[in-house]
Each structure stands twice: as C-alpha cells, then as structure tokens.
Image (spheres, grey):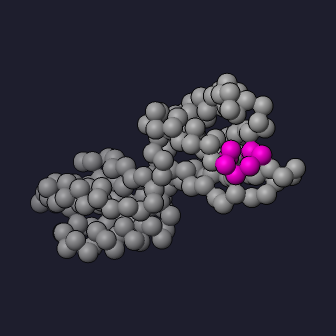
Amino acid sequence: MAKDSSFDVVSQVNMQEVDNAYQQAARELTQRYDLKGSGAAIELSKPEKTFTVTAPADFVARQVIDILNSKFVKRGVDLKSVSWAEPQAASGGSVRIVGRIVEGIDQDTAKKINKDIKGTKLKVKVTIESDKLRVSSPSRDTLQQVIAFLRDQDYGQPLQYVNYR
C-alpha cells in the first residue's frame, strides 16, 4: 500500500524581518521633515509581538503605520500578519494605536479551513494540530489542488504550506 503524502498549513512570521522593518521605519521617523519633532514614535515589543504607535493626532499615527507597512512590503512581510487595533486616546491629547503580530492558526480559523477543504469534496484527510493543520492524501495531485484552493481563499492571515512530502 502506498504511503500518504502530506503537507502542513501554518501561519508564521519571520521576526528578524519584522525587526528589520521596524528599525528602518524608526530611522525614517527621525529623518522625515514632516514627522521630525512631531512627537510621533513607534515601539516594538518582541516578547509580546506587538507594535505601539504614539502620535499627536490620528492622521500622524496613520502616516507612521503607512511607513511601517511600506517597510514590511520591502522586507517581504505580509501585511495581513499585523492586526491593528482602534486608536485610543493617550495622555496629552495624543493617540496610541497597538498592532499585534498574528502567528499560528487559532481554532476557529482552523475549523473554517477544515470545513472549506471538506467542502471541495476532494479525497483528503485534515488534522488540526494545535496551531497548524496537516493535510494528507494518497494522491499528490489532490494535495496540489488543495493548496491552489487555499491560495484563492482569504482567512485574514497569511498561510504557508510547508513539509510537503
């Protein structure tokens, strides 16, 4: 009997590239004439995997986020990997926006992906393993069809397909 082929569906972010993008954005904040001395700042907390943008106004905070997003694109980090919260009022009339780096697939999203794969009626077996999904099938062509199907879907976070065997 032939051994089943499989691959894993994961959601991972390269934290080194995130850190590089953060460093470049922080440097640009100190050098751009329209933001220099404006009181806008950005901080990265690596253990908590969060960004904190503080600015004197919502408009300026959005500019800082746009700068950070442009650095993410240049470094190859998917923009869906950061979810930004709503602006909060901070001391001195300033605004604070917190962004969280999304890693791993939560249970609700995993169940939705599982349901969507089962809805394709392809002969595959899907197993949810903590923060990833393992998809297996005797046919490699079927696995390729599942990957193509998942690339067309939007689950609000970037998905990678690893350990293809």
Q: Residue at x 70, y 39 (%)?
A: 42
Q: Residue at x 33, y 62 (%)?
A: 153
Residue 61 percent coordinates (x, y) = 68, 46
Foreground residue among 136 and 101: 101
Is residue 3 shown to the viewer in this render? no
Is residue 79 shown to the viewer in this render? yes
Horizontal arrangement in the rendering, residue 71 relative to residue 151 (left or right): right
Foreground residue among 152 and 125: 152
Q: Residue at x 34, y 74 (%)?
A: 115
State the count of labels: 0
Quadrant of residue 111 within the rendered picture: bottom left
Q: Is residue 83 above or below residue 126?
A: above
Which residue occupies the extreme top position in the image?
Answer: 31
Residue 74 percent coordinates (x, y) = 46, 33
Bounds of the magenta span?
Answer: 54-61
Horizontal arrangement in the rendering, residue 6 relative to residue 9 (left or right): left
Which residue occupies the extreme left position in the image?
Answer: 1
Q: Is residue 93 above or below residue 39?
A: below
Residue 113 percent coordinates (x, y) = 36, 67
